[in-house]
Image: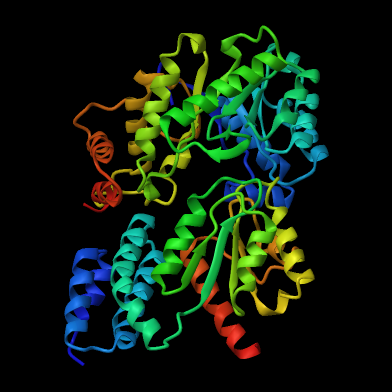
């Protein structure tokens, strides 16, 4: 992974990754720490730490241990405020050259997360996939709703941390698996990224997606034996980075690269963007099944 | 009965236009709808499931095949209902309270519909009582719940508890799924089953229906 201008949060220490879950269940902490070392060496800027439904104490202990093997800052990944608090409290900025950790993530439904600024400064991932409309939480289905969700979350960040620089904020506009995208989600996402990027008030705010989610449920290889996932993810980056995407939660083992326009994966995504409903799925299928 | 194996092929290959066309001509020739389902359509979806299980098919093929199945079923359902033929089963599905994630839930709903279940999709952020009230409408209903967050999966238990206190627990079956879940969690909260993906969910729903038929 070495794309200029792209920051990566290494995704491997996550309870929803089956091989990592198995390590957690077996109590294989040395194995988990090896994942941290491997991602550090592989070019991750942050190391994500997601312990699933385990206890706050478990998160705190793991943060200390992971910081024992890497000087990269961590991304404390949980929807649970108690686990987030434990992770942020245990994190030692001195061990990460003074860098602040990422908190993955805050949504309009997770107001308590803002109280964690009392613990320490962190860089929140603002998950702009849901928003409050007339007091009710609804999924962001359009680019305008995603943009509005991002604006609302940035406003909340500024309220809870007056003077927070835009550089501390990371907006996640939400990426959906292309294997099931019959509703034009990719179009929504790219349009939302562009809107956020073009808003002068949001200048310098980072934008990140969980890139591996884009290709889940797809085969690993095309009919001709060439890779499916790294190609489609690279094609996504090639299209999304010029629009403003500058961060991913991803894998150091994936060979991300910017692709030429005539690459089959680029042609596939361009075709998906032009297609409606199930025709988009047919384009994806055409890419891997020929 | 004439040979409508084209219908089988249309579903396996995900050709929804052909599936509807063959179904129409079969009905014009007075073919028994339940025979079409039993002889061609269910075997076709089984084949799709098999291909998925051995990594020959992936989620796009599942969705495309389920759409073809649905195109055919839509033509047959009114006739089946008129003839008093029961659906495979009834599933009330939704993402639990506090959770707005619906990709997995929608996938499972499509596959269940494709497998011939009557599917009532309650959407996302579904309050426990909504599951209970919709399940109450018919005995033998399967309540299928999805959650993507460790903080919301606990809300599944509230639904199981409400079913219990409403005296409905023995009259329905409960199945659960979602990224942070495990079979152990499903057992802990008193669900009847857990499935890891959409095709497993169909197999599980079928098993729950057959269990129900033998124990109810």
Q: In which quarter of the view is residue A113 placed?
A: top right
* Residue at image coords 77%, 24%: A115
Q: Viewer-proximal residue, B115 or A263?
A: B115
Q: Estimate the x, y position of residue B196 in percent, counting from the top left.
A: 55, 61
Q: Is residue A177 left or right of residue B182?
A: left
* B99 shown above or below A12: below
Q: Estimate the x, y position of residue B27 in percent, counting from the top left.
A: 22, 83
Q: Viewer-proximal residue, A138 or B51?
A: A138
* A38 shown above or below B145: above
Q: Is residue B55 left or right of residue A166?
A: left
* Residue at image coords 55%, 27%: A9
Q: Residue furthest top?
A: A163
* Residue at image coords 57%, 57%: B94
Q: Estimate the x, y position of residue A121 in percent, counting from the top left.
A: 72, 16
Q: Is residue A42 visible?
A: no
Which quadrant, please, contains the N terminus of chain B?
bottom left
Q: Estimate the x, y position of residue A229 in percent, counting from the top left.
A: 37, 42
Q: Viewer-proximal residue, B181 or A127?
A: A127
Q: Is residue A140 left or right of residue B212?
A: left
Q: Viewer-proximal residue, A260 or A29?
A: A260
* Residue at image coords 50%, 54%: B104
């Amino acid at each position: 992974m070495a794309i200029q201008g792209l920051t990566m949060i290494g995704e491997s220490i996550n309870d929803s990754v089956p091989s990592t879950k198995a390590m957690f269940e077996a109590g294989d902490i040395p194995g988990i720490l090896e994942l941290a070392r491997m991602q550090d060496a592989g070019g991750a800027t942050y190391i994500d730490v997601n312990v699933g439904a385990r206890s706050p104490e478990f998160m705190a202990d793991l943060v200390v241990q992971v910081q024992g093997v890497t000087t990269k800052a961590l991304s404390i990944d949980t929807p649970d405020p108690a686990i987030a608090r434990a992770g942020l409290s245990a994190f030692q900025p001195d061990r990460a050259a003074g860098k602040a950790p990422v908190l993955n993530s805050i949504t309009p439904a997770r107001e308590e997360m803002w109280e964690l600024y009392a613990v320490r400064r962190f860089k929140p991932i603002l998950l702009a996939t849901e928003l409050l409309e007339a007091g009710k939480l609804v999924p962001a289905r359009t680019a305008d709703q995603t943009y509005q969700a991002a604006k609302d979350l940035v406003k909340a960040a500024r309220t809870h941390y007056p003077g927070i620089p835009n550089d501390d904020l990371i907006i996640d506009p939400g990426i959906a698996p292309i294997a099931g995208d019959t509703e034009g989600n990719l179009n929504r996402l790219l349009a939302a990224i562009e809107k956020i990027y073009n808003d002068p008030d949001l200048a310098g705010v980072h934008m990140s997606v969980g890139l591996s989610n884009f290709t889940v449920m797809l085969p690993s290889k095309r009919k001709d034996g060439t890779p499916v996932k790294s190609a489609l993810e690279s094609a996504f980056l090639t299209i999304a980075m010029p629009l403003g995407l500058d961060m991913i939660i991803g894998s150091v083992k994936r060979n991300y690269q910017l692709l030429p326009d005539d690459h089959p994966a680029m042609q596939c995504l361009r075709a998906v963007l032009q297609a409606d409903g199930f025709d988009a799925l047919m384009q994806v299928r055409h890419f891997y099944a020929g | 009965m004439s040979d409508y194996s084209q219908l089988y092929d249309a579903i396996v290959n995900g050709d929804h236009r052909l599936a509807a066309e063959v179904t129409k001509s079969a009905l014009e020739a007075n073919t028994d709808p339940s025979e079409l389902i039993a002889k061609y359509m269910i075997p076709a979806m089984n084949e799709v499931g098999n291909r998925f299980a051995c990594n020959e098919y992936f989620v796009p093929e599942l969705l495309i095949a389920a759409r073809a199945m649905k195109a055919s079923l839509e033509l047959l359902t009114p006739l089946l209902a008129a003839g008093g033929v029961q659906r495979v089963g009834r599933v009330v599905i939704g993402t639990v309270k506090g959770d707005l994630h619906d990709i997995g839930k929608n996938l499972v709903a499509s596959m269940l519909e494709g497998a011939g279940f009557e599917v009532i999709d309650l959407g996302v952020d579904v309050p426990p009582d909504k599951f209970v009230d919709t399940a109450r409408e018919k005995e033998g209903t399967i309540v299928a719940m999805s959650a993507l967050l460790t903080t919301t999966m606990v809300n599944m238990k509230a639904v199981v508890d409400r079913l219990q206190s409403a005296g409905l627990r023995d009259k329905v079956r409960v199945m659960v799924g979602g990224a942070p879940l495990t079979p152990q969690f499903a057992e802990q909260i008193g669900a009847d089953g857990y499935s890891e993906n959409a095709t497993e969910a169909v197999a599980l729903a079928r098993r729950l229906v057959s269990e129900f038929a033998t124990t109810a």
